[in-house]
Image (cartoon, grey):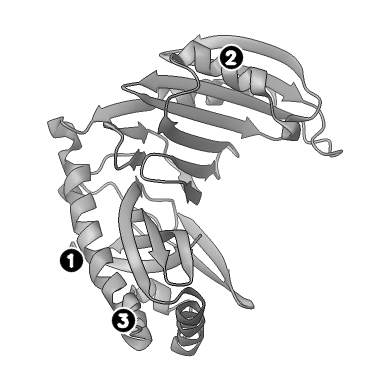
């Protein structure tokens, strides 16, 4: 998993990933959820790297992922359903609404993969560049929530279509009441406790202490001086913390040649004295002793 942010002139890039260690209760793939959704979405894919997370409130969240081996880009948008009531209706709604970013496309087709209704089209050019891109939008509706999956690939060839179908076929939904979701819930609770402890340091303007509490992998990529400058600027810009509520969470599996430990991203809906609305993202790494440590903090 890669998280990058520009901190007033320098770039902090933290590379982490996770292994599927049996003692941790994780399986292959990526787990995504909002706190209010009745299920956790799982994508069984070996090298999906979560590159971006956005959240609007405690019910709507957007995850952007990429696969290094297949060059697929995969985004997942989870939100309460209101504009359409079924997977097919939502597919047709997305297609009818359109998107100016699509530009000119051809070979439009509709279909169904498992419980997902989808449409796809081919774009020989994107913004004047000969990217040869295929886009697939797959829609799923269940228990009052709508999942919008967008898969794309540049330099698309016909044989790549099987990869698109494989992604959709790999998606499953684990009800939060089921025992199979217990490992996720347990690790989410532990990660949330660790994040809460670190955020108390941040809220109390303890910049040195918050740096010392970062994971060793993070402190290897940024000096204390750099962190202190970032921390102090954020404190001045944001003001005192007023509220914070967990709204979304993601866990992912390991990526080859990187660390072999799980990583979580927690999203909080937050407010500050000088910024009434914001989304805080806290990334955490599962250390070898079973504890979670902070690898990064971003305010969107």
Q: Residues within 10 Å of mark 1 (few under 14, many from 20)?
A: few
- According to the picture, the residue beneath numbered tag 3 turns out to be 204
Residue at horizontal 44 percent and vertical 87 percent from the top: 224
- First along the sequence among labels 2 and 3: 2
Q: Residues within 10 Å of mark 2 (few under 14, many from 20)?
A: some
Q: Position of residue 70 (x, y in %)?
A: 57, 37
Tell me, yes or no, if residue 261 can be seen here. Answer: no
Q: For this rendering, which residue is in front, 190 or 197? A: 197
Checking the image for residue 92, the label placed there is 2
- First along the sequence among labels 3 and 1: 3
- In the image, is residue 209 above or below residue 92? below
Checking the image for residue 259, the label placed there is none
Q: Secondary structure at mark 3?
A: loop
Checking the image for residue 289, the label placed there is 1
Spatial separation of the CA atoms under disc 2 and disc 1:
49 Å
Q: Position of residue 300 (x, y in %)?
A: 51, 59
Image-quadrant location for residue 127: top right
Residue at horizontal 35 percent and vertical 76 percent from the top: 216
């Amino acid at each position: 998993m890669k998280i990058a942010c520009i901190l007033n002139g320098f770039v902090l890039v933290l590379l982490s990933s996770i292994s599927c260690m049996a003692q941790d209760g994780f399986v292959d793939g990526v787990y995504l959820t909002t706190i209010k959704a009745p299920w956790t979405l799982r994508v069984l894919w070996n090298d999906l790297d979560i590159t971006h997370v956005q959240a609007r409130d405690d019910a709507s969240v957007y995850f952007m992922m990429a696969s290094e081996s297949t060059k697929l880009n995969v985004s997942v948008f989870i939100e309460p359903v209101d504009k359409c009531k079924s997977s097919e209706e939502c597919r047709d709604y997305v297609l009818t609404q359109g998107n100016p970013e699509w530009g000119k496309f051809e070979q439009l087709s509709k279909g169904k993969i498992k419980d997902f209704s989808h449409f796809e089209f081919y774009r020989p050019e994107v913004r004047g560049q000969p990217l040869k891109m295929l886009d697939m939008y797959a829609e799923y509706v269940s228990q009052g929530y709508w999942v919008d999956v967008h898969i794309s690939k540049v330099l698309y060839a016909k044989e790549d279509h099987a990869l698109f179908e494989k992604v959709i076929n790999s998606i499953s939904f684990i009800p939060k009441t089921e025992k199979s979701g217990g490992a996720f819930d347990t690790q989410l609770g532990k990660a949330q406790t660790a994040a809460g402890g670190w955020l108390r340091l941040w809220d109390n303007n303890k910049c040195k202490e918050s740096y010392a509490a970062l994971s060793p992998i993070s402190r290897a990529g940024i000096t204390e001086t750099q962190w202190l400058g970032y921390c102090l600027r954020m404190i001045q810009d944001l003001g005192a913390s007023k509220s914070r509520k967990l709204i979304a969470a993601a866990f992912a599996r390991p990526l080859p040649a990187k660390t072999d430990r799980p990583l979580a991203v927690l999203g909080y809906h937050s407010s500050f004295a000088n910024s009434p609305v914001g989304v805080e993202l806290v990334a955490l790494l599962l250390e070898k002793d079973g504890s979670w440590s902070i690898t990064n903090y971003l305010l969107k």
